[in-house]
Amino acid sequence: MSHGFELEPPKGPPIPDNPAVAAIARVLNAINELIVKVSMVAMLLTALVLTYSVVMRYLFKVPTDWQDEASVFMLIGVSFFSGAYVQSYRGHIGIEFLSTVLPPSVNRVRLIMVDVVSGAFCAFFSWKSWTLFHEAWVDGQTTTSTFAPPLWIPYGMMALGMSLLSLQILTQVLAAITVSKVAPVAAGRPA
Amino acid sequence: QATVLKISHQFPGGTLEEGDFRDRLCRMFAAEVQKRTKGALKFEIYPGSSLMKTNAQFSAMRKGALDLSLVPLSYAGGEVPEVNIGLMPGLVPSYEVGAAWKNAEVGKELNRLLLDKGIVVVSWIWQAGGVASRTKAVVDPDDVKGMKIRGGSREVDLVLKAAGAAVVSLPSNEIYAAMQTGAMDAAMTSSTSLMSFRLEEVSKYLTSGRGQSYWYMFEPLMMSKAIFDKLSKEQQATIMAVGAELEAFATKAAKQDDALVATVYEKKGAKVVDLNAATVKKWQAIAKATAWKDYADRNESCAKLMKMAEKLL
Amino acid sequence: MSPLTLGVLYGVVTLLVMFSGMSIAFALGVVATGFMYFFMPAASLDTITQNVYEEMASITLLSIPLFILKGAAIGKSPAGRDLYSAIHAWLHKVPGGLGIANVFACAMFAAMAGSSPATCSAIGSAGIPEMRRRGYSPGFAAGIIAAGGTLGILLPPSITMILYAVASEQSLGRLFLAGIGPGLLLVVLFSGYAVYRARHEYQLALAAYQQGGVKSAYLDEEHFTLRQKVEMLPRVLPFVILLIGVMVALYGGYATPSETAGLGALLAMVLIAIVYRVWRPKDIAPFIASTIKESTMLLFIIGMSLLYSYVMSYLHISQSAAQFVVDLHLSKWLLLSVILMMVVVFGFFLPPVSIILMMCPIILPPLRAAGFDLIWFGVVMTIVMEMGLIHPPVGLNIFVIKNIASDIPLRDIVMGVLPFLLLMLVAVILLCLMPQIATAFPDALMGVK
Ligand code: NA
Ligand code: NA
C-alpha cells in the first residue's frame, strides 16, 4: 500500500461470514459510503465558506460573523459522522503490539474484549450525547454569537455519529464471534 | 474531614498578591473562607481554563460537576438568554450603577433567575472595558464605519454593525495575530484583557474605560447551587459574606486596571483617548435601538429585566 | 488516595489499556470515564460530552482537516510527483538531498499551519512514498517526516505558543519570533543527519549489491542535463503560487489564521484543477476521503485526550506533580531539568495543549524566580513537547505516519524517529548554552526586553 499515487477508490471493509451479520454490515457500509460522500461536500463547502469570508470582508467590508461557526458545525459533523466509517476500516489507530506476541486463539479473544469495551464506551458516550441534544432542544440553547445557531445541530450530529459508531463496533464484535473459521493473525486488522 | 471545592476561571494564574485581579480575587476568597471555616472548606484554584473550557463552566456548575467559577455571565447567553444583560452596551454607564444592581430590583430578579437555573451568585463584580485599535481612535460611533472590528458578544456586535462596522468573529486566542497582520483593525474587551492579550504591542490607539464607558461587563464569582445546598448553614453564610466583602476589592482593582491600561498603552507609544458623557450617550442611543430591543424582544423575562435595569439609569 | 498515587495509577492503567490493542482514542476515553466513575462526583459523567464538544468546537482546532486537505490535494495528485521529480533532478547529486527537501517543505508548511500533525500529514503524504521510491529505508523516511512535522508548532503560527503566551503573560509576537531561530537550528540538524544517514544507507546498499544482492534505488545512475532540469522548473510553479498565495493572505492581513486553512485548501484544489485537470468528482474523491479518514482519526484522539486531561486536571494529578517538584527547591538548572523531564513524561499521554494549560500556572512562577527568561523557556518547552509528539505511546505524528504509510511497522517508525529525538535533545542543550538562538531575533526586531 501507499507506494505510489493510488487514485482509485479503496476496496470496501471486510464482510462478515455470518449471513445475518453480513446483512447488517452491508447496510452500515452503505450508510457509511453515503456519509463519506456528504462529508466530502461539507469539507469543500467549509473551504469555500472560509474563503468567501475573506473575500467579503476584504473587498466589500461586509461583516463576517457566521462563517466560523458554520465551518465549526460542518467539521464537527464530518468528524463525528465519519467515526463509524473509519472504524469499519479499523482506521482508529491503536498499538498492535500484542498481536505479534500472543497465539492466535488468545488474540481472537483479546480483540473481541477490546471491541466490547470500546463499544460500551461509545454507547455510553452516545447516550450522554443524546441527553445533551435533548437539553439543547428543550431549552432552545444556541451559541453566544450574533449568528446564534441552535446547539442541537452539532449535539445531534455528535449523538448520531457516536450511535452509528457504537453500532459499527457491535457489528464487528458480532462478526468476530460468528466467524466460521479463524483467519491467521488479527483478522481484519492492519498489523 | 475538609471539603475541597474547585474554583475554575479563564484568566492568567498568579498569587494572592500579584497578577490578574480576577485570579487574585479567587485566591483571596479561598484563603479567607478557609480561615473562617477553620479549614473545613478548602479550595483548589484552576486558572487559565486549566480545568475545562470557558464555555463549559456555567453548565458544569448547573449540573453540580464544578463547584465555583468566576466567568463573564453573558458567556452563558446561549443557554440562558436572560444573562445577556450582563454585557449590554450602555445599560451600565458607571461602576456606581453596576454596584447598585445587587440590591435593586434588577439584581434581585437576576439572582432569583440564576438560583432557579442552579447558580448562586457569590460576588457581584463589574468591569469596564475599552477598544484597542491599529488604524484610528474609536470614540464616536461614526469612527467604526468600515472598520474590521471584534465586539466579542452578540449584543456588542449588533451595536457595532448598526454603526457601520465590518464585524469580525474569531476566537479570542487569534486576536493578537489578526491585529498584528491587519486581518482585524480593532478589538473591544475588558481593561484587564486588553493588557493580558498584550494588544498594546499591535495597537496605535486605545479608547480607555477610565471615567466614562458604555462597556461594562458583569463577571461574578458563582457557585453551583447543588454543591452550595450541601454545605452547612454556617458555611453558606461564610461564603456569601466573604463574597460580598470582596466586591469592594474588585471595584477598586478594576478601576486601577482602567487607569493602568492607559499607562501601558501610552508607554508603547499608543494614543489614548477617553470617552465623555456625550459620546457615551451616542453609543447608548444606538444600543437602545438595536441590542436592548433585540434582548427585550426575546421573551417576557428578558423584557422585564431590561425594564428594571433601565430604572437605574 | 493522594493525587500522586492516583497519578501513578492513572498512568499505569492507561498504558495497560493502550497496550491491550484498543484504539488510542477509545483507550483515552475509557480510562478517563472509568476514573471519573470511581474518583469523581457522579455529576461529572453528565458533562463528558459537553466537555469534549467545547474542546473540539474551536475553529483553530478544526482547521486541521483543512490543512490536511491542502497537503493531500498537492501530495496525492500528480502535482506532488512532479514537484518531487523536479526537486530530485536538481538535488540528486546531494546525498540525502530529497530528505533535506522534505525537511524544508515541512518548515515551509509549518509557517502556514499551527499544528504539527497537519504539517506531518501534508508533507508526508507525498514525501514518504517519494523518498522510499528512491531507496530511503522506511524508518528513515518516516523519521524525517515525523520530526519535520514537529516544526508545525515551533514556527509561527502555532496553536500551543498562543496558549503559552496567555498562560505566561508574555508577548505572543516575541514568542513567535523566538521560535524561528531554534526552528532553523532544527532544520539544519535534521538536514545534516539526513545527509549522514543517506550516505550510510547508500554505502550499505552498495555493499549489498556488490555481494550479489538486489539493487537499491539508491544506486540508480541518473543524469539530468541542464536543459532537462530547467524544463522541470515550471512543475514547481503551482506549489510556489500556493505557498506565496497563502503566505500573503496570512501575513498580509487578508485572512485570519483559521481562514487561511480554508483558503489554502481551496487554492490547492483550484491549482490542481487548472494545471493537472484533476477536478472531476472521481479524481478528487479519493484524496478528500483519505483526508476525512485521517482527520477523523486525529480529531477523535485529540477530543478524547482533552477529556483524558480534564480528568487528570480534576484529580489534581499534573498540578500536584508540578507542585511537588517546585517544593523541592532545587537549584536553577536542576529545576529546569526536572521540569523538562516531567514535560517529557506527560508527553507520553498528553497533547502539548493540555500540558501547557495544566503545568504552566505552577511551574512558571518558580522558573521566573530562578531567573529564566520565560520567552526562552516557552521555546525550550515547545521543543520538548514536540518530542512527545513523536514518541510512544501517544505520539500524534507517529499515528499520522502509520496512517499515511500503513505498511511500515510501528517499530520501524519508532526506531526511525529515535535519532531525531536525540537531535532535538541536542537542540535543547544548545539553547541552554546559547539562549541567543531564541532571543536574538525577537530582541533585534522588538528591542531587548
Ligand atoms: Na506553524
Ligand atoms: Na507522546
Image (cartoon, rainbow, N blue to C red):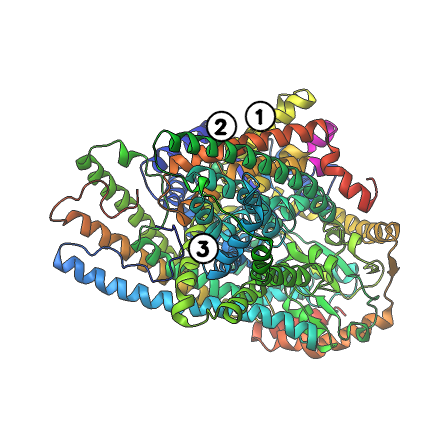
Place of residue B237 in the rendered image (x, y in percent of width and height, measured from the top left)? 60, 44
Disc 2 designates what residue?
A: C4
Estimate the spatial distance between the alpha carbons at disc 3 and disc 1, rounded to whole Å.
37 Å
Mark in the foreground, 2 or 3: 3
User: Is there any visible trace of residue C320 in the rendered image?
Assistant: no
Foreground pick, B236 / C420: C420
Q: Chain of mark 3?
A: C
Q: Is the C-beta separation of discs 2 and 1 under 8 Å?
A: yes
Q: How many marks on residues?
A: 3
Foreground pick, C399 / C161: C399
Quick check: C147 above or below B172?
above
Q: Which residues are magenta?
A: C365-376
Quick check: A5 above or below B241?
below
Disc 3 designates what residue?
A: C295
Q: Secondary structure at mark 3?
A: helix
Q: Is the C-beta separation of discs 2 and 3 under 8 Å?
A: no
**Furthest residue toward left:** A180
Q: What residue do we see at 83% from left, 66% from top? A: B136
Q: What residue do we see at 57% from left, 48% from top? A: C106
**Disc nearer the start of the sequence (2/3):** 2
Q: Is the C-beta separation of discs 3 and 1 under 8 Å?
A: no
Place of residue B82 in the rendered image (x, y in percent of width and height, measured from the top left)? 59, 67
Foreground pick, C408 / B128: C408
Mark 3 surroundings: few (<14), some (14-19) or many (≥20) residues within 10 A: many
> Tag 3: residue type?
Ser
> Tag 1: residue type?
Phe
**Disc nearer the start of the sequence (3/1):** 3
Disc 1 designates what residue?
A: C324
Q: Secondary structure at mark 1?
A: helix
Whether callout 3 and callout 1 share a subunit is answered yes
Estimate the spatial distance between the alpha carbons at disc 2 and disc 3, rounded to whole Å.
34 Å
Q: Chain of mark 1?
A: C
